[in-house]
Image (cartoon, rainbow, N blue to C red):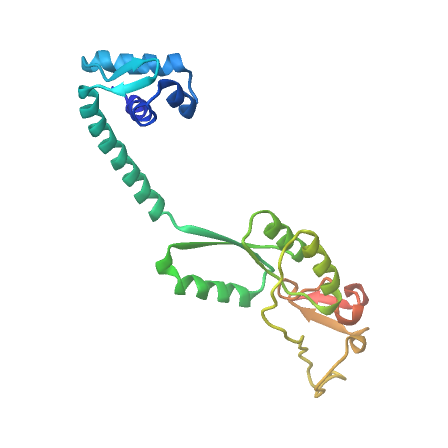
Amino acid sequence: MQLQQLFYVAEVAERGSINKAAEALFISQPSLSKAIINLESELNIRIFDRNNKGATLTEEGKSLYQYVRTILNQMELIEGISASDAPKVLPAASYPVLTVSRALAGFYRRRQGYGIALRMREVRLAEVVEAVASSAEIGIVFINNAQFKEFKHTIGYKNLEFNPIAQDTWYIDAGPESPLYGRSEVSMKELLGLLLIGYLDNISWNQADSAFALSAFSVVSA
C-alpha cells in the first residue's frame, strides 16, 4: 500500500467520479483506475462500485475511507505544524548606515515572539530601489535635495511608495585651524576647494546639496 493510493481513494470518494478525480489529480483515468484496482487486490476488498453515473463507495469502501480520511487529516496537521514553526521572512534593503542597522536590530528584538526573520541587504541607492521593485518588502534610503526629484520619478515609474521617516542636516567637524571653525552654518559652496574627510559608506555622496557634484571636492575616505 502506498500513501499515493490513499490520496486517490479520497479524491474519487469525494468527487464521486474516477474521471473527475483524474482531472483534479492531473493523471490519466486509466492510471487512476489501475491504482485503485491494485489497492483493492492488495486489501482483498472492493472499494468502489463503478457505473455510468460514477463511482460510489461500497460498505467496505466506506470503512476504508474513514481510515484514509483520518490519515490524511493527520498529515495535514503535521504539515501545518511545520509551516507555523517556520519564521515569516521580512526581506529589506538599505543604504549602509550604522543607524539603520541599529534600528532594525531593535525592531527584530521587539518582535522575536512574532516569528519574524529579518533578511537585510546593504546596497547603494539605485540598488535599494531595484531590490524593493523585485523582492524586498521595504527599502531605506538617504536622499539629499539634488537627488530627490530623480528619485521620485524613478519610484513612480516602478509603482513604488515613498514615506519619509525623518529629515536631518549634514554636519561638519571643523578644527580650530579651519576657517569654518565656530560657524553655526556653512553653505556647500563654501566647501569648494577644501579637503573633506568622511566615511563614504555612511554618507550619500552621489551628489551634494545645491547641485554641487562630489567631483568638485577633494575627498579622502577615513
* Residue furthest to the bottom: 182
Q: Position of residue 85 (x, y in %)?
A: 33, 48
219 and 20: which one is in front?
A: 20
In the image, what residue occupies the spot 70% across and 60% down? Answer: 152
- Residue 148 lies in quadrant: bottom right
- Residue 169 lies in quadrant: bottom right
Q: Is residue 43 above or below residue 216?
A: above
Number of numbered tags placed on the structure image? 0
Judge left or right: residue 51 versus residue 46: right
175 and 10: which one is in front?
A: 10
Q: Position of residue 176 (x, y in %)?
A: 70, 86
Judge left or right: residue 127 versus residue 121: right
- Which quarter of the image is occupied by the N terminus? top left
Task: Answer yes or no: is residue 207 visible.
Answer: no
Task: Answer yes or no: is residue 32 visible.
Answer: yes
Q: Is residue 103 above or below residue 188?
A: above
6 and 18: which one is in front?
A: 18
In the image, what residue occupies the spot 39% across and 62% down? Answer: 111
Q: Is residue 165 above or below residue 6?
A: below
Q: Position of residue 168 (x, y in %)?
A: 63, 75
- Which quarter of the image is occupied by the C terminus? bottom right
- Residue 182 lies in quadrant: bottom right
Q: Position of residue 195 (x, y in %)?
A: 75, 72
Q: Is residue 117 above or below residue 172?
A: above
Judge left or right: residue 82 versus residue 124: left
